[in-house]
Image (spheres, helix red, strand yellow):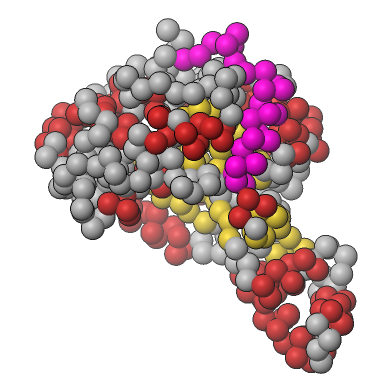
Amino acid sequence: MTPRFAAGVRLHHDVARGRWVVMAPERMFVPDETALEVLRMVDGARDLDAIIDALAEKFDAPREVIAGDVRALLDDLVVRGALVT
Amino acid sequence: MNAPLALLAELTHRCPLRCPYCSNPVELTRASEELATGEWARVFREAAEIGCLQVHLSGGEPTARRDIVEITAAARAAGLYTNLITAGVLLDAALVARLQAAGLDHVQLSVQDADAAGAERIGGMRGAHARKEAAARLVRDAGLPLTLNAVVHRQNLHSLPRLVEIALEWGAARLEVAHVQYYGWALANRDALLPTRAQLDEATRTVQAARDAHRGRLVIDYVVPDYHAARPKACMGGWGNRFLAVAPSGRILPCHAAESIAGMAFPNVRETSLRAAWEDSDAFNRFRGTGWMREPCRGCEHAERDWGGCRCQAFALTGDAAATDPACALSPDRALLLAAVAEAGTTEFRYREFG
């Protein structure tokens, strides 16, 4: 599974407010810190395993712990229409 | 003071359609007075600097400008999420490809009715409906996300179920069902456009049923007509609170209809920065927050929820922009609104035109 942003959806640095936002057609939302870490790994090339590996290394955490969190987050972002797989 | 989130860029008042509910002012700006490409590029940079995340490229018909691709690229270069609000009749495959290459994020396409005859009577342009269908296909084929915008009123509400089907057939992921708001041209045509209570209730049921039937395939946004409401809308999310517009002339407005309020002077991007206009101008501070309110708005529990409703509507109906919007059941001028509902019923339009 290789997640990518849905058409018309992108991550945007809101410089004026010091935060990242997900911009989408006629709406936007502010991802929490964990969702942001996952979204920043989504580039249309990394598959699920690669994203889990990268985050496990970045946070020096057990892979199986990271894997559960990432799967749950990706599912949520797909339901919200931000990502497609 | 909050920073603005979105800029409405009205690039031109020119448009091949003549919709009798057009949101442009009755006094239209001519092409010779429009801002130049470079001026728009500066406006976009200034908008991003003060906090705007999104720009709506609108009009008139934005693609009537020959520099629409350069304007789109400038908006994207400024870091803005770029939404094209179009009638679609001037789009072809080459232009869609160039807009997409320039970084366009999303297209909102208007539709006037569900069938060609109705749509072309309302929009005042022969052949428009088929061109819109073709435009929707071009947008979808390019992989751009599409929202269909259906402005609904007394003379097309019977078509709403079919409009939902069209949104699905044309490949839109979103449908905006927007009841006409009564300023400018729409106010001049109010007797022809204002729906009956029964029509409104039927439309609300239709939208709810369609949302349930097409969940996951089609998102439906619904803008209700406040002539039948008990509470006014939180117009623009509050005056000078999250939104600003720049008219084709360069005037900087708290709302695209604000020029309809007599006696107000608006800053112009040719002389004033967006930041100065947003933070310091009388036009933006006049109705910002709650300090300007009188009773029944002053001290009302809804004051920071609906901001006293719409200033343009208050002025249009009562002659006083600081009055409570008559769409509020607490307004002493409520009878003006009820009388308008009672009087509506003509089928004659006064089409939009340059004066």
Report the front residue among A36 and B94.
A36
Does residue B29 appear left or right of residue B226 in this picture?
Answer: right
Q: Position of residue B302 (x, y in %)?
A: 26, 55
Q: Is residue A35 left or right of residue B320?
A: right
- Give the residue furthest to the front: B280
Name the side, left or right, on which B309 lies relative to B174: left
Q: Position of residue B206 (x, y in %)?
A: 37, 54
Left or right of B124? Residue B57 is right
Residue B128 visible, this angle: no
Residue B315: x %, y % from top left:
26, 28
At 65% from the left edge and 58% from the top edge, which residue is drawn? A18
Nearer the observer, B320 or B108: B320
Residue B45 in the magenta stretch? The answer is: yes
Q: In which image quadrant can residue B338 be found?
A: top left
The residue that appears at 66% across and 26% down in the rendered structure is: B40
Question: Can you say whether B162 is above or below B286 in the image?
Answer: below
Residue B200, image x and y in percent?
28, 46
* Total number of numbered discs in the rendering: 0
Q: Is residue B122 magenta?
A: no
The quarter of the image holding the C terminus of chain B is: top left
Q: Which residues are magenta?
A: B28-54
The residue at 52%/56% (across/down) is B219
Q: Is residue B101 above or below residue B30?
A: below
Residue B350 in sight from this viewpoint? yes
Q: Is residue B293 above or below residue A15?
A: above
